[in-house]
Amino acid sequence: MTLRVGVIGTGGMGREHIANLSVLDGVEVAVVADIVEKSAASAAASCGASASTDPAALAVDATLDAVVIASPDDTHAALAITAIQSGKYVLCEKPLASTAEDAGRVVDAERAAGRDLVQVGFMRQYDPSHLQLDAAMSGLGALRHLRCVHRNTNHQWERPLELVFSQSLIHDVHTARWLSASEFTSVVAQVVSGPRPVEHVALLGAMENGSTVTIEFVEATYGYDVEVEATCEHGVAVAAQPPQPLIRSDGVQHRHIGDDWFGRFAEAYRKEVEDWVAGILDDRVNGPTAADGLAAQRVVDAAIRSASSGRREAV
Ligand code: ISE
């Protein structure tokens, strides 16, 4: 059987998923939709799909088994609900929605459908160095503190605080929920502005299991850099950086860090779609669910409230 997949959104992430799906046996990227006709046409040509400029029509297309949603964030929830109502499996890029309220609507739509259909694109859960960290933590006793550092590049534009939290920090929030196997109960977030509205964010979260989480986010210029460090009862585990050759040249030696998430998480994106497809073939969602998308969005909403109130906010 060939799984017929439609892809909505042909920006960077849509194209990444198209490339990764196209090399999988038994998968056909059959239709690609984008409201920008030229972009839909060129992405469709890259994988032999047909092109559409109507994302909502793709979401209800009865000839498709599953849909990837990689369009702008504020379109995710409505498209996911449409796809759920037409009985399709969905891989929805993060965030699941722009607000917790809308993310809740997606979860409600799944409940009405009577089954989980949505996987959310929290791809760090597939990253080899994050998986190694998870395994290392299991031998070190209870988690006491998780420290996540996210230095982001490639944002030439000035993102308002809400977008920095819902597009970027939401990854670290998911990492913290996943690695601690616990939920945030409260957060306090501080934002430092500079030339950009958000230069630096420091977030401190308290978890149900008594551990704490800090997330530090910085708009960096030197490279894309993600770190995770777990302090546990019997020791500390630090996620390895992806292996890179050591280069000696011009009197210095260095290792390349990478400029963006496409390089840093290339393997994770591949594993993510492989696991999504494997789940569909077993008639289930294997990866992060819509409920995870909702839980992360609730933390983000509380962090946004805290950044403006200056107080600790309950999640
Ligand atoms: C971007 O949208 C992503 O999803 C990246 O993984 C994240 O690191 C970056 O901060 C976001 O802007």
Image (tube, rainbow, N blue to C red):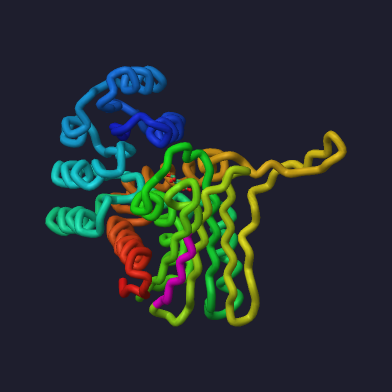
In the shown orientation, is residue 146 left or right of residue 178?
right
Residue 72 against residue 293 in the figure, above or below: above
Q: Where does the image place residue 313, in percent across and percent down from the top left? A: 33, 73
Q: Which residue is located at x 22 percent, y 31 percent?
A: 55
Q: Where does the image place residue 173, in percent across and percent down from the top left? A: 42, 62
The C terminus, quarter of image = bottom left
Q: Where does the image place residue 62, in percent across and percent down from the top left? A: 16, 33
Q: Is residue 231 visible?
A: yes
Q: Which residue is located at x 87 percent, y 38 percent?
A: 251
Q: Quadrant of residue 114?
A: bottom left
Q: Quadrant of residue 68?
A: top left
Residue 184 against residue 42 in the figure, above or below: below
Q: Is residue 219 magenta?
A: no
Mostly what secondary structure, the magenta segment? strand
Q: Which residue is located at x 52 percent, y 49 percent?
A: 219
Q: Which residue is located at x 37 percent, y 18 percent?
A: 42
Residue 270 against residue 166 in the figure, above or below: above
Q: Where does the image place residue 223, in percent across and percent down from the top left? A: 60, 43
- Residue extending furthest right? 251
The N terminus, quarter of image = top left
- Residue extending furthest front? 195
Task: Pick whichever, 314 or 84, lies toward us.
Answer: 314
In the shown orientation, is residue 62 left or right of residue 91?
left
Residue 123 against residue 304 in the figure, above or below: above
Q: Is residue 24 visible?
A: no
Range covered by the magenta-colored residues = 201-207
